[in-house]
Image (cartoon, grey):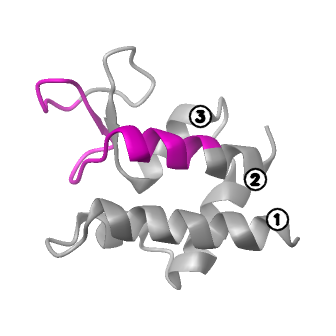
Amino acid sequence: MTALEELKAARQLIEQGWCKGVFAQNNHYLPVDCKSEEACRFCALGALRRVSYWFDLRSEQALAEALGTHKIGEWNDDPARTKEDVLAVYDKAIAAAVHN
């Protein structure tokens, strides 16, 4: 998968379900491995890890550039952060990747 494809796929996962504090959660809001079949909610980084066999640093770099920091996990977990905020950053990263 290209970085653009990974970003689009990860965004779709977050749209379906988002979480904070862990890479992924199951239907009971319990932490699970992001590759688990039970995973249905993902943080910003957990979604990228789910969609790529080998975590592609190009995807993470594109997301970090859109965000303006490499502290993606801390940003995702901020108490004021919303799912809409995360989706907006993914949209920005996707738009930038389309133009590269």
The reply to whether the C-beta atoms of the residues labelled 1 and 2 are less than 8 Å apart is yes
Residue lying at 30% horizontally and 70% vertically, measured from the top left: 74
Q: Is residue 69 magenta?
A: no
Counting from the top left corner in percent of width and height, residue 89 is at: 50, 71
- CA distance for labels 3 and 2: 12 Å
- Number of numbered discs present? 3
Q: Amino acid at mark 2?
A: Leu
Can you identify the residue that label 2 sits on?
Answer: 4
Q: Which residues are magenta?
A: 9-31
Q: Classify residue 14 as left or right of residue 78.
A: right
Counting from the top left corner in percent of width and height, residue 33 is at: 35, 27
Q: Amino acid at mark 1?
A: Val
Kindly identify which numbered label has been placed on residue 98: 1
Residue lying at 59% horizontally and 77% vertically, measured from the top left: 66
**Observer-nearest of 35 and 26:** 26
Counting from the top left corner in percent of width and height, residue 35 is at: 45, 24
Query: Which badge, 3 or 2, comes first in the chain's sequence?
Result: 2
Q: Which one is closest to the eye, mark 3 or mark 1? A: 1
Residue lying at 74% horizontally and 73% vertically, measured from the top left: 96
Quarter holding the C terminus?
bottom right
Kindly identify which numbered label has been placed on residue 51: 3
Kindly identify which numbered label has been placed on residue 82: none
Name the residue furthest bottom.
68
- CA distance for labels 1 and 2: 7 Å
Residue lying at 65% horizontally and 29% vertically, measured from the top left: 53
Query: Which badge, 3 or 1, comes first in the chain's sequence?
Result: 3
